[in-house]
Image: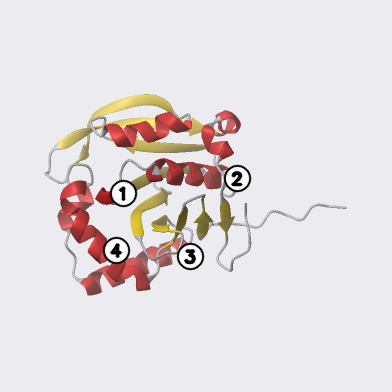
Amino acid sequence: MDLPEPLPGPAYRIHTTRLVIRCWQPADATLLHIALLRNADHLYPWMAWIKGEPLELQRRIELLRVWRGNFDHDLNFEYGIFSQDEKLLLGAAGLHTYLGEGVRGIGYWIDKDHNGQGFATETSAAFTKVAFEVDHVTRVEIHCDPKNLASAAVPRKLGFTHEATLHNRIEGADGKLNDSMIWTLFREDYPQSIAATAKIEAFDVVGRKLI
């Protein structure tokens, strides 16, 4: 008997052992708004976009509509990281397309009260698995400031290779240029990586299981 053809992505929902990682909806605007107000100082050293905060709630609703539109049109993939009951927002992450066709870039931030619990690693492992097994990319990259030791630990744990540190490449929220570490996992190395063993389920826009 012939096996069915794999369903096309993208993955709108991803379930890990502790998390629900899903596409943002405009209805999430208040949750995100409150989270960013709480985390502005926490994110300021690492996230240049935080200098634009706080946004008006209506502007955030409009932004989430843009993110959802980009998601639906396969332009870029922004996700919220939620508790399993989806009542608690634990952070946000992106499976980004800015590196070009056949490549994904992973970005993430975790709520200040939930740091140190492995949520960034769990999310990045899930994204890596989705990138290779659903999106069928050739490589995945994670970029981070070398001073952000917690962030740099994520790709190291998952078996990414530190390919380079680029000097004075990324503008920070304070307007200064910071270094950027480039961590990469190639398709041929993925089966031997920790990410390949991640226990996840991924679903398309109508809830059909992809993984």
Q: Position of residue 17 (x, y in %)?
A: 51, 49
Amino acid type shown at disc 3: Asp
Amino acid type shown at disc 2: Glu
Give whichever of discs 3 and 4 has the lower sequence position: 4
Q: Are marks 4 and 1 in contact (CB under 8 Å)?
A: no
Give whichever of discs 4 and 1 has the lower sequence position: 4
Residue bearing the label numbered 4:
32
**Residue extending farthest right:** 1
- The 10 Å Cα crowd at callout 1, few under 14, some 14 to 19, many 20 or more, is few
Which quadrant of the figure has residue 68? bottom left
Residue bearing the label numbered 3:
72
Frontmost of labels 4 and 1 is 1
Residue bearing the label numbered 2:
133
Residue bearing the label numbered 1:
114
Q: Is residue 121 above or below residue 53?
A: above
Query: Residue drawn 19% across and 34% down?
Result: 178
